[in-house]
Image (cartoon, rainbow, N blue to C red):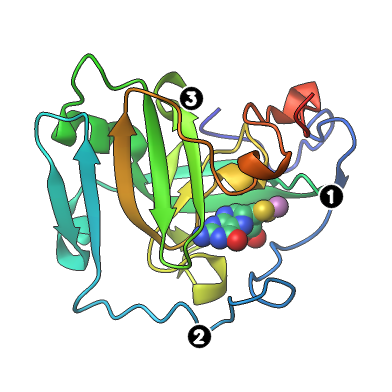
């Protein structure tokens, strides 16, 4: 869903979730990550798109800003049980990256690597929705470092650990590469509506 009516909240909370007002800023209870760390200098920042693609890309921050911008309002659900309704994200539709990089037929999955060493991965179909963005604006303001500045993934239908913050590398792969939490017992499917939290 690319648009949600902010006033209608009924039926918007997946099983086991409770609504909170604002996204928690990452860094307080996450070792190695603070508001200032990872320090990313926009002058040298790049996001690399490679792997099973016909046209590998290396996008500078200026390149990112030049790509078409999409707005999508969606709800964000963390596996720990909190949800934030009506997050207004702006950024690059993931489909835009697909059309630029032209994945080969062998590309079935995408691994995201981040400046803090975090990783997560999704299948190609999971990334093609109208609400899947590489976002750099939240609720009308440039993303704060604690929310994933300069560029973060948003995948609303999945628990938050699929939404990689501080993305630096987007790698198309033929085989699934399990991400940081997915290797540690969290579900690789992570479907919020199926309450799919842990590896069975
Ligand atoms: N690079 C990176 N991305 C990450 C994480 C992380 O530790 N490092 N944590 C994930 C988890 S568990 C959640 S809930 C969301 C939280 O980010 P937000 O509150 O800004 O949406 O980021 C996800 N992406
Ligand atoms: Mo999370």
- The image quadrant where one finds the N terminus is top right
Q: Which x, y percent locates residue 99? A: 19, 29
Residue position marked by numbered label 1 in the rendering: 19
Q: Is residue 131 visible?
A: no
Q: Earlier in the sequence, mark 2 or mark 1?
A: 1
Cα–Cα span, label 3 and label 1? 24 Å
Q: Is residue 84 left or right of residue 48?
A: right
159, above or below 62, in the image:
above
CA neighbours of label 2 inside 10 A, class few (<14), some (14 to 19), many (20+): few
Q: Earlier in the sequence, mark 2 or mark 3?
A: 2
Q: Residue at x 16, y 34 (%)?
A: 101
23, above or below 170, in the image:
below
> Is disc 2 placed on a helix, strand or loop?
loop
Q: Is residue 152 left or right of residue 189?
A: left
Q: Residue at x 41, y 46 (%)?
A: 112
| Residue 27 found in image quarter | bottom right
Q: Residue at x 14, y 47 (%)?
A: 57
Q: Is residue 77 left or right of residue 45?
A: right
Whether disc 3's CB lies below 8 Å from ligand 1 is answered no
Residue position marked by numbered label 3 in the rendering: 126
């Amino acid at each position: 869903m690319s648009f949600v009516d902010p006033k209608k909240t009924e039926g918007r909370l997946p099983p086991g979730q409770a609504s909170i007002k604002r996204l928690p800023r990452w860094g307080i209870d996450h070792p190695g990550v603070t508001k200032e760390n990872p320090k990313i200098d926009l002058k040298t920042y790049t996001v690399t798109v490679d792997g099973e693609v016909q046209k590998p890309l290396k996008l500078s921050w200026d390149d990112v800003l030049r790509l078409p911008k999409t707005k999508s309002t969606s709800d964000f659900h963390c596996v720990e049980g909190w949800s934030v309704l009506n997050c207004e994200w702006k950024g690059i539709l993931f489909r835009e990256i697909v059309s630029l990089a032209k994945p080969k037929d062998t590309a079935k999955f995408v691994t995201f690597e981040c400046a803090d060493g975090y990783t997560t991965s999704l299948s190609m179909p999971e990334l093609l929705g109208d609400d899947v963005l590489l976002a750099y604006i939240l609720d009308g303001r440039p993303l704060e470092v604690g929310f994933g500045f300069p560029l973060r993934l948003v995948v609303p239908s999945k628990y938050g650990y699929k939404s990689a913050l501080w993305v630096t590398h987007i790698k198309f792969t033929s085989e699934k590469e399990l991400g940081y939490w997915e290797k540690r017992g969290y579900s690789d499917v992570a479907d919020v509506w199926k309450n799919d939290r842990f590896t069975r």
